[in-house]
Image: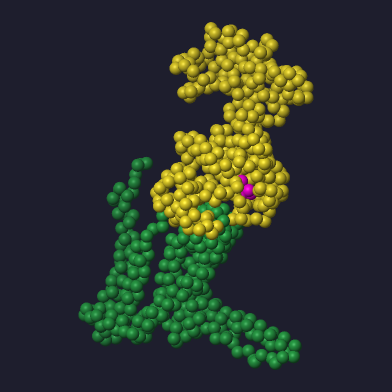
Chain colours: A green, B yellow
Amino acid sequence: MAEQDWKTSKRTFAAVSLPTLFWVLLFFLVPMAIVWLYSFGENRGLTDIDISGTLDNYKRATEWLYLTIFGKSFAVAALVTLICLIVGFPVAMAITFASEKWRPWLLLGIMLPFWTNLLIRTYALMMLLGTQGFANKGLGALWEGTSWIKTLVGLQPLPTWEPVQLLFNNFAVVFGLVYVHLPFMVLPLYAALDRLDRSLIEASLDLGAGHFRTIMRIVVPLAAPGIIAGVMITLIPALGAYLTPDLMGGTDSQMIANVIERQFKKANDWPFGAALSFLLIYAMFILIAIQSMRKKVPEVR
Amino acid sequence: MTEPAKPIIQIQNVSKRFGKVTAVDNVSLDINAGEFFVLLGPSGCGKTTLLRMIAGFELPTEGRILIDGQDMAGIPPNKRPVNMVFQSYAVFPHMSVADNVAYGLKIAGVKGAEIKARVAEALELVKLGGFGERMPDQMSGGQRQRVALARSLVMRPKVLLLDEPLSALDAKLRAQMQFELSELQEKVGITFVTVTHDQDEALSMACRIGVINKGEVAQLATPSDLYEYPANRFVADFVGSVNIFEGKLTLDEPDKAAVDCPGVGKIYLNHGVTGPHGADVWVALRPEKIYLHVPGEGKAVKAAAQDAPDGYNFARGKIKGMSYLGDITLFEIELDGGARIRVSRPNLSRHDQEDFTWDDRVSMHWRADSPVVLLG
């Protein structure tokens, strides 16, 4: 009994793993395969798709118009990832070096947004950023205040406050995506920083380095696995973001996922949508492949 | 060594509290320039906190620390003239050995050619010449410790702090490193302050030892004084192995004293103890200072070493336990008075361990200068 190893007992292994394997095959790989086949098909009627093996969908997907949308999606996702990294790194550091008492609460704060549906969070954010939202009201109050002070000292008042357009543009998309993806960046960064031997940081200080140099020369290089994990886990979903650009973006800020959605719904061009989807999947594959081929940082315990 | 001892580190009335826990309690001690000083104590006694306060990683709640006459209050770790070798060595895993050693020099703005020369010199000093290009994960624990040593020594600090430097090494390597550290300290002439819980380590390396117990200095002494003249029961018990008996002081004159220890017998000392007459005291007696009488030759030995009045410093009992350790044999003996006593006996000849066996009745004596009377 004590010697039992489920890995060597093939029947137990099969009993445990087969249902899951079956589930993955049936509900994940099969639909993917169907979509993949569609990408080589053409529309014959409203619902009839003929899988003819044509490459026309891919040809169309690589037209300039779509390439620019792909490019823009990459640019937006990269910018979002960069902002998340710049904002998230100090946050992760703060959590790592917070006292035992505070750390669980800070981590809870990072994870709290996951308790609320993304759609609700996005609408809440839109209310915040709208022309009648808190952000604009706050700015307006500041504006009026400045204007009032100017008249008080006998200067010309400022012109009437015009609300700033914070929504339905590229700024709103980047802002919304950063808001949504920040926890994805902070958590792997925290995991990496938490594993870091504190005495390495102390050794650096002891050898005369200041805090900034210690972070750049010791903390960042040793947290590299966490940084890369955080970048991947932020970049990939940001690249395929659909809801945020759809709700918060303007007419010129759609990302590739919005185009794909339109093919499956309004345009009713499933083969073309499938081809776009697979191009996106291939792009993500390449990203993951690059990451896994990276030389491992040696770890000394 | 003839110049008068000059304190390089002065710890003055330093206390450190973490919330309600007092880690270091009003400690004052001076560490002299050029000495190998060891802070010895059980884990959690505050010795590491004291070391970290010297390095600047913890700030004293009260009191002050001076290094080379300069008050260290408000001076961060990276501006202090001390360097530390960490318990985990803290060798930067993403840098080669040479880059590790050069790290502090680069920050200090030392020129490239000089860095190269000093790194090579430091690595040579710790017997790692030619290992510069290695990465830390290609090195053993002992080698990584040498890297940490070189990385600190290359900075030419006024004081080198070592936090449990040998605790992660296996026994053989530890014994070797004890010698090497002492040798290195003599060679570079830098003051070493080491923290350890290992009394062998402390006794073998230190010029002076500060024994720390519950955040306070229990005794400050040279290794031999610490062992032969412990100031209190804690030190006697913590440093080495010891028998401690409770007793009453029955005689106390400048050149002799006597203690009556129930269960053991009457103990005679050839010096005074300046304790209140009739006071409750403790007597510490090291196991190796008790001579077991081999049947047949007992009387002769006793007669030869008789420096106490009849009936003193002599006991009989029964062997209740023996453990043969190769160089010595340890005996656990139940005395006729009821007390248990530990005696160690060197195995001077190959057959010495055959002299005694379990349940043998034995007699023993000790010299009048062996017991130590402890008042606290």
Report x, y in % for residue A162: 60, 89
Q: Is residue B51 visible?
A: yes
Indicate left or right for A251 with B81 as reference: left
B214 or A17, which is in the foreground? Answer: B214
**Is the residue B152 above or below the residue A81 in the image?**
above
Q: Quadrant of residue B203?
A: top right
How many numbered circles does the render carry? 0
A276 or A73, which is in the foreground? Answer: A73
Quarter of the picture holding the N terminus of chain A: top left
**Is the residue B65 above or below the residue A87 in the image?**
above
Report x, y in % for residue B58: 63, 51
Q: Residue furthest right?
A: B277
- In the image, the segment drawn in magenta is B51-55
Q: Residue at x 53, y 47 (%)?
A: B153
Q: Residue at x 29, y 86 (%)?
A: A46
Q: Is residue B20 visible?
A: no
Examine the structure image and report whether residue A232 is included in the region drawn in magenta. Answer: no
**Is the residue B103 above or below the residue B23 in the image?**
below
Q: Quadrant of residue B370?
A: top right
Report x, y in % for residue A163: 59, 87
Majority secondary structure of magenta residues:
helix
Q: Residue at x 48, y 79 (%)?
A: A173
A43 or A206, which is in the foreground? Answer: A206
Report x, y in % for residue A56: 25, 83
Q: Residue furthest left?
A: A52
Q: Quadrant of residue B25?
A: top right
Q: Residue at x 68, y 51 (%)?
A: B70
Indicate left or right for A129 with A170 as reference: right
